[in-house]
């Protein structure tokens, strides 16, 4: 039986067709480009855009400055003030002027590592006046773990002895509180020879009844003019505003510095005095009342 002939397919030189690329219309491309340009222009001209850019630039510049440029008196936006460097324990002092304070918010405030560790609270003035917010501030500050201290505004023409007794009747100090404070800001026309013994009467009565050495608060210039060299054994708290450094000589020992009177503090609706402690947290702990009656 004859074998069938092999059928071979003819080779062709035709190549497979590739789909043609669609030409993009120049008019469509230019329209899209115009839309992008319009969006960019709107963003650049927008106040919102400029606001974001400015905020970013300011934040970056402050970060760069704090990191690479030594600034001994930097501005802290959250507090709204400049705060001197090289101090690690910060606090405030308050009175009825600050109104009703949300002490929980005060205790929670923490900005760039700065928080409110302590508060001096006005208690009394003269021999009759009790600060209207003292009891609330005294209670709520401790409840929210802010170290508290009470101060008395001294009236030079009133008996120092009776002012001390009035203060002690009002304030019930406990372990963990700051020592009591006498706030001396005026002479009321008294000579130094009249003023100093009256202050000493106040200090002696407080020490006698509490076994605690009180803190003396006063202004920088008032201290130089009236108190320097008189009460060197007592802890000193001095007011000296808007300065990068407290301009005392090295031999002048001080514990607290009230460096600003216009700070913004969370939970307080009015401007507040801002203070630093001259030491570390353990130094502050050593200053606190260790036991009380």
Image: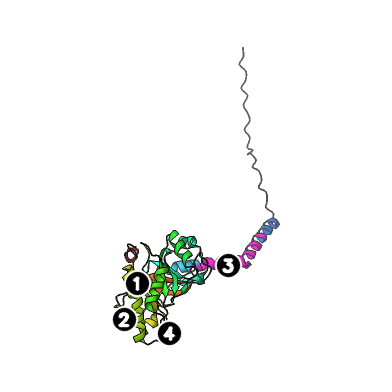
Comes first in the chain, label 4 or label 1: 4
In the rendered structure, which disc, 2 or 4, sits on the residue that comes first in sequence?
4
Q: If you read the primary sequence from the N terminus, does the residue marked by circle 2 or circle 3 appear first?
A: 3
Q: Please tell me which residue is depicted at 58% across the width and 67% down the height of the picture.
A: 51
Whether tag 4 and tag 3 are in contact, CB under 8 A, the answer is no
Q: Can residue 71 be spotted in the picture?
A: no
Range covered by the magenta-colored residues: 35-58
Q: Label 1, secondary structure: give it.
A: helix
Prevalent SS, magenta region: helix
Q: Position of residue 89 (x, y in %)?
A: 38, 66
Assess disc 1: are there few (<14), some (14-19) or many (≥20) residues with their C-alpha within 10 Å of its C-alpha: many
Asked if labels 1 and 2 touch by Cβ distance under 8 angstroms, the answer is: no
- Distance from disc 4 to disc 3, alpha carbons, whole Å, reads 52 Å
**Where the N terminus falls, by quadrant?**
top right
What residue is disc 4 on? 188
The number of discs equals 4
The label on residue 51 is 3
**Residue holding disc 2:** 230
Which of the two residues, 261 or 142, is positioned nearer the viewer here? 142
Q: Quadrant of residue 55?
A: bottom right
Whether residue 106 sits left or right of residue 196 in the image: it is right
Q: Earlier in the sequence, mark 2 or mark 1?
A: 1
Q: Which residue is mark 1?
A: 206
Q: Nearer the viewer, mark 2 or mark 4?
A: 4
Q: Is residue 134 visible?
A: yes
| Alpha carbon separation for disc pair 2 and 3 | 55 Å
Secondary-structure class at tag 3: helix
The CA span between labels 1 and 3 is: 56 Å
């Amino acid at each position: 039986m004859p074998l069938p002939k092999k059928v071979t397919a003819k080779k062709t030189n035709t190549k497979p067709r590739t789909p043609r690329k669609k030409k993009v219309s120049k008019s469509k491309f230019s329209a899209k480009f115009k839309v992008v340009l319009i969006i960019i222009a709107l963003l650049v001209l927008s106040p919102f855009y400029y606001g974001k850019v400015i905020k970013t630039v300011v934040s970056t510049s402050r970060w760069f400055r704090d990191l690479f440029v030594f600034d001994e008196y930097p501005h802290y936006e959250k507090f709204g003030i400049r705060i001197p460097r090289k101090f690690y324990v910060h606090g405030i002092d308050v009175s009825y002027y600050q109104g009703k304070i949300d002490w929980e918010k005060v205790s929670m405030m923490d900005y760039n590592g700065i928080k409110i560790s302590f508060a001096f609270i006005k208690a009394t003035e003269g021999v009759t006046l009790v600060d209207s917010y003292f009891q609330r501030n005294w209670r709520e500050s401790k409840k929210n773990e802010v170290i508290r201290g009470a101060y008395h505004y001294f009236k030079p023409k009133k008996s120092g002895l009776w002012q001390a007794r009035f203060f002690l009747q009002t304030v019930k100090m406990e372990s963990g509180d700051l020592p009591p404070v006498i706030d001396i800001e005026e002479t009321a026309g008294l000579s130094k020879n009249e003023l100093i013994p009256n202050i000493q009467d106040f200090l002696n009565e407080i020490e006698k009844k509490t076994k605690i050495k009180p803190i003396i608060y006063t202004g920088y210039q008032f201290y130089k003019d009236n108190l320097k060299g008189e009460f060197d054994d007592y802890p000193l708290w001095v007011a000296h505003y808007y300065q990068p450094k407290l301009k005392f000589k090295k031999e002048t020992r001080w514990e607290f510095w009230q460096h600003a009177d216009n700070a913004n503090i969370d939970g307080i609706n009015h401007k507040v005095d801002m203070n630093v402690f001259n030491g570390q947290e353990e130094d502050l702990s050593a200053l606190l009342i260790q036991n009380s009656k």
